[in-house]
Amino acid sequence: MKDKRIATLFLTIFIDLLGFGIVIPILPNLAKTMAITSHMSFNPDYAVGITAAAFSIIQFLFAPLFGSLSDRIGRRPIILGSILVNAVGYYIFGFAGNFIILLVARIISGFGSANISAAQAYIADITEPADRAKKMGIIGAAFGLGFVFGPPIGGLLFSKGGLFYVGTFTAALCVLNFILAFLFLPESNTNRSGHRRKASDTFKGMFQVWNMEVIGELFLINFIYIMAFSMMQVNGSVLWKEKYGLNEMQVGKIFGVIGIAGAIVQGLLIGVFSKKLGLKKMLLLGCPMVGIGLAIIPLPPNLDWFYVNQGIAILLLSVGNGLLMTSINALVSINTPPQAQGTMLGSLQSLSSLSRVVGPLIASFLYANSKELPFVVAGSLVCGLFFLALKLSKKLKAENTSHSVVPK
């Protein structure tokens, strides 16, 4: 990356996702333990879903607000401010001694991590339209790398120095990021007197798509798929600790393997799948692969077949995720008129954030009744999407053509 601005934005998003990844193997069990020691009045299993949902709901609400505000006051102050807020959130996380402080720390981090829309707008400001898609790809790369490196680092830090090491390390990364952004990220929005996009437009657009032919079905598939996958992300570490006796470092390694496998599939295999299968078949195959992968995670009664089983699950999830993510995004784009591409894909991203609120809450309720239930339910939901995808595939036009969405 020769452009220091692009490199700095990449680092900003990467640290956001690295911080998210670092807490994945730690937060669920920590939230449950702190709910018990803090004598909270609700079932401690619910604490797992509450902490995960709190982060996502703040991100969901403030991402479009930050994007709108960056149109008015500029990208630079939003990005710099959010980095500092993130540093504060992770520092508080490192000293959390009870459930309430832990929850406050995650809310602050959700607020600080809601800078994705401002980062996307910055890239749009400094790139030509023909080069924009390629540059926007750095955000996807930062997401993937954050999930690859975050969980193993989090597990290692927690095993060496507990919560203090996790929080202070991540806060220090944010401070370093702030310094680099302050030095190498000049203001990009030089025309702040133009049209001011309303943050409410994002929410309106997200709900209007349900009445659009094809797009509505794709959004529903995406919502259920992301919701189900978030159920595994939140309760996986709790299951692996309570049923199989794994520690935080081992859990972090499992999530790291999931991230690496996903990166390999996305980087090396999806192009092959796209050429050989086409988007419609990718969508149809992705549903049962992800569904079966989720459902088999809790099947081994003990450690005897655990790693073999998890290996199969990771393979199914990695390939299935690649097929679903690629096909959904591409089909939404193909079935959206050119002048509405940004709005539609932004609405899809916002809906994904909302699904990460709903999924953990449902999973924590199910887990309180049975350790295996969140995974079985999540897997069944995604397998069931196959029939919706099959019905949708009959409506889709040829994949190399575009057509405008039409209200039902």
Image (tube, rainbow, N blue to C red):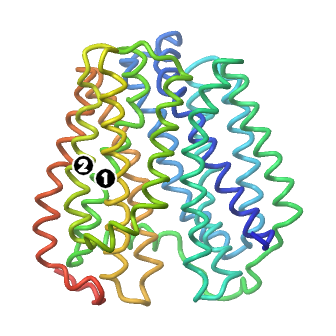
Residue 34, percent across and down? 53, 16
Task: Identify which amino acid the numbered label 1 is placed on.
Answer: Gly
| Mark 1 lies on residue | 320
Residue at image location 30% in from the left, 82% down from the top:
335
383 above or below 6?
above
Residue 128, percent across and down? 65, 88
| Cα distance between the residues tagged 1 and 2 | 5 Å
Label at residue 289: 2
Q: Nearer the viewer, residue 245 or 93?
A: 245
Residue 298, percent across and down? 27, 25
Position of the C terminus, as image quadrant, is bottom left
Residue 77, percent across and down? 77, 64
Q: Nearer the viewer, residue 373 or 89?
A: 373
Occupied quadrant, residue 183: bottom right
Occupied quadrant, residue 277: bottom left
Task: Say what secondary structure mark 1 lies in.
Answer: helix
Task: Say what secondary structure mark 2 lies in.
Answer: helix
